[in-house]
Amino acid sequence: MSILAKPVLLIGAGHMGGALIAGWRRARALEPGELMIRDPEPGTQALAAADWGASLNGPDDRLAAAKTVVLAVKPQAWRAAAAAVAPFLASDATVVSVVAGIETRDLSQAFGARPVARVMPTTAAAICRGAASIWASTAAARAAAHAVFEPLGAVVDLADEALMHAATGASGSAPAYVYALVEALQAAGVAAGLEVGAARELARATVIGAAGLLEASGEDAAELRRQVTSAGGTTAAALGVLTGDGALERLMTRTVAAAAARSRALSHE
Ligand SMILES: NC(=O)c1ccc[n+]([C@@H]2O[C@H](COP(=O)([O-])OP(=O)(O)OC[C@H]3O[C@@H](n4cnc5c(N)ncnc54)[C@H](OP(=O)(O)O)[C@@H]3O)[C@@H](O)[C@H]2O)c1
């Protein structure tokens, strides 16, 4: 376990920033006095953290205390957010950015050449079941990012910054693919004759149960699939449609590539 340098300053407490707050609190990674939050329109998690005792939109002269700065604003807002805090930060503060597509070279420049790590997280960080892909050019910045995300789930180091685009497509954006799968399974259940409520309950419970078994068993997904697919049975018939001729793999490859391409484009906007 890497040691988290505190206090932590979180810039942007929307969907992802809010998930980080919830996860840190669940994991007891921080005491209230060790969390500073900046957000012009604080949402539920930021307000709950302020009730808990964290500092919310405190004075600029307090920012110098921050040892780790987590940047979690939208890509369009990052330059303004960085410019608003950078002059007040201590020279040894490390910046950990979860902003999709924005490169460490640009981030480091905007933060006065302070060390920067990039992370592509998932919102399941809120329940400490996240997946975080990490890249940094220095061991110290990488360790800072590990310390921020290890309490929040799995962490994976990337060998090259360019791989952040692939990690965005294959992980950061991917919870939405799973939710879309649940929606499609529910709709298909209705199309097959189930009532809406029953189809919803079954789709949710089936996906949650399959994910739980994946975790509890530690088996590869391919092995679990084989275990529930008997030759000539109903599941084999279904998979003939879903994965026959590599259909699902081709669709998923295009899906991940679209997210990666958007991430590349964001880095040039
Ligand atoms: N959501 C995900 O699943 C996910 C996954 C991986 C990575 N990310 C990355 O996480 C970042 C945040 O995404 P999100 O979905 O959490 O966006 P979001 O819900 O819009 O949250 C961003 C928050 O930052 C606030 N903000 C804007 N300007 C600010 C400033 N100058 N200083 C402080 N706070 C400011 C926004 O306030 P206003 O609403 O007032 O603008 C908003 O509350 C993005 O860069 C995204 O690439 C997200």
Image (spheres, grey):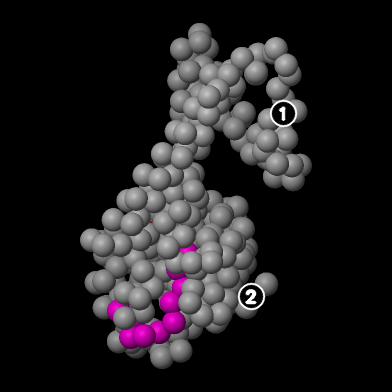
Compared across the picture, whether 31 is left or right of 228 comes to left
Crowding around mark 2 (Cα neighbors within 10 Å: few <14, some 14 to 19, many 20+) is some
Relative depth, front residue between 202 and 167: 167
Q: Position of residue 225 (x, y in %)?
A: 68, 30
3D distance between C-alphas at marks 2 and 1: 38 Å
Give the amino acid at mark 2: Ser
- Can residue 70 be spotted in the picture? yes
The numbered disc on residue 197 is none
Farthest bottom residue in view: 91
**Residue 15 lies in the magenta stretch:** no
Q: Which range of residues does the magenta coloring cover?
A: 110-119
- Mark 1 lies on a secondary structure that is helix
- Mark 2 lies on a secondary structure that is loop
Q: Position of residue 237 (x, y in %)?
A: 61, 14
Vertical order, 71 against 63 (above or below): above
- Can residue 30 be spotted in the picture? no
Is the CB–ligand 1 distance for label 1 below 8 Å?
A: no
Q: Position of residue 51 (x, y in %)?
A: 46, 66
Residue at the (53%, 24%) spot, across then down: 245
Tell me which label, 2 or 1, sits earlier in the chain: 2
The numbered disc on residue 2 is 2
Compared across the picture, whether 201 is left or right of 215 comes to left
Question: Which quadrant of the view contains residue 89?
Answer: bottom left
Cβ atoms under marks 2 and 1 closer than 8 Å: no
Q: Name the residue tied to disc 1.
A: 226
